Amino acid sequence: MTGGPAPEIPALATSRLSTLGVLARLLRDPLSALPPEVHTAPVVEARFAGGQRLYLLDPALIQDALVRHADDLTKTSDIRRVLGPALGDGLLTAEGAHWRWQRRGAAPAFAPGRLAGFLPAMIAAADATARRWAALGEGAVVDIGHETTVTTFDIIVSTMLSGGAGLDVARVERSVSDYLAPAGWMFAIGVLGLPAWTPHPGRRRALAAARWFRGAIRDAVARRRAEPGGGGDLVTMLLGGADPETGRAMTDGELADNIATFIAAGHETTANGLAWAFHLLSRHPDQEERLVAEVQRVTGGGPVRPEHVEGLVLTRATFEEAMRLYPPAPLIARRARRGFPLGPARVEEGGVLVVPIHALHRHRLLWDEPERFDPDRFLPDRARARHRYSFMPFGAGPRVCIGAGFATLEAVAILAVLLRAFRVEGTTAAEPRPSMRVTLRPAAPIRMRLRARDPGNRASPT
Ligand code: HEM
């Protein structure tokens, strides 16, 4: 940890939160159920319902656990309980050999050399949003989270499942919200060790949303089997791939699990990160002007093209700083298959390790003025000086987000295309509250007013 912990802070703090206290907080917002010590100590130990929970905030220990001890860890049953009904046994939720095989099959689609090939589709989707905004008229007010969701959904569907397969974005957006609404209940049921079918508020609606989503994906798979094509998108790759060890190809069910996983994991997270980025920029017009000046300089005042995106260093830093303050995946957790020593603690067999990314990214032992929005923290020189695991919006170790490079490219392209054409202003002085529903979403829609910049900056005509 940079500088080492302050002397009065114990290396291993013990949380005094009771199981009952944690349950009540989980139902309100899982982020509020974290022991308060996570904001000051490097490691916090707690016991809920008899089981050990270790909260890690020391980057070196996080690396030790998630990378060196990766084979000693599995995902927790929580993640399967919460996401399994919607995503089945796809890449995000699978374990062991089934996970490894799927990761090998999907990895080539995300290889660095291939990512640039997605940029034309990313820019086209952002241009389509810019045209939609222009049609709304000067001063129109939009829900920025909805706007970023439509844009990232358009991108994920056109790149992963070309042709879109007739998926209705409004219906998908509604199902994701309905599905995630009772997430706090699902986590609480997990802490109590109750079965997944335990009734709770919002359960019926969530299951109906999952049924609809999976049905729509299964139809898309059937259509794709009937009419092959797709020009090298992810589905073509998964359809054509076979396990190098067994020669087995994916069944329709496995294919549906993975398409559902990529669509769900691959658009809502980036959309939330972007919504927070637009909000932060609206509160810091000086930073917004710097970003727009960078875009103008790199593009020479013309439309954003694929070859410009790599040079948009401050735009990328701005997105990273937004993800520091509002990480779209605000915590990750693992269960220990066997015990091992970890810094000042001992991980017990069956114990749960939690990396509270949201708290890590605002930890005062790691960041100067952690609450301040300062994109320059992510300019290459300053970023290099930090421990790599003090910033981990995409997780770490073998289960690190496969879409990290994809998400960053699309976010930079979207910010550049939209901000060079529009100023996006806040409509209220009240600070929007984040709420964790697996992902970190604004608790209420963030409404923003659109002001066209110089008309010469509008989206390129198609
Ligand atoms: C800003 C946007 C994104 C954020 C913050 C994010 C965050 C994460 C995190 C933290 C994990 C690891 C979870 C864990 O360790 O338990 C993860 C895994 C994953 N993400 Fe992302 N993600 C983003 C975008 C994407 C995109 C664009 C895609 C697909 C195109 C994607 C697909 C996945 C998949 C499939 C996994 C599971 C990987 C595995 O277990 O092998 N994500 N993501």
Image: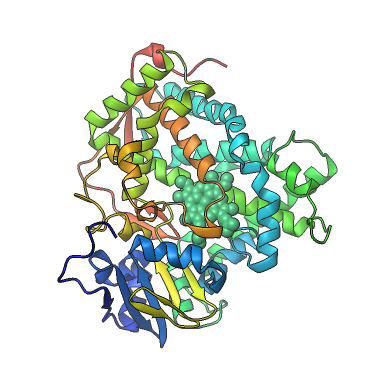
- Circle count: 0
Question: Foreground residue, 25 or 173?
Answer: 25
Considering only vertical position in the picture, is 292 above or below 231? Answer: above
Residue 412 placed where, x, y %? Answer: 44, 33
Considering only vertical position in the picture, is 444 above or below 307? Answer: below
Rendered residue at 21%/45% (across/down):
372
Residue 114 placed where, x, y %? Answer: 63, 35
Question: Foreground residue, 56 or 456?
Answer: 56
* On-image quarter of the N terminus: bottom left
Q: In this view, does 250 lie to the left or right of 401?
A: right
Rendered residue at 40%/13% (across/down):
301
Residue 133 placed where, x, y %? Answer: 43, 26
Considering only vertical position in the picture, is 23 above or below 246? Answer: below
Question: Foreground residue, 88 or 213?
Answer: 88
Residue 42 placed where, x, y %? Answer: 29, 67
Rendered residue at 40%/19% (across/down):
298
**Where, by quadrant of the figure, is residue 434 drawn?**
bottom left
Q: Is residue 136 left or right of residue 154?
A: left
Considering only vertical position in the picture, is 257 above or below 341? Answer: above
* On-image quarter of the C terminus: top right
Q: Which residue lies furthest to the left in this view?
A: 8
Q: Which colour scheme is used?
A: rainbow
Rendered residue at 43%/60% (across/down):
437
Specify whether residue 395 is in view: yes
Question: Foreground residue, 312 or 419?
Answer: 312
Specify whether residue 216 is in view: no
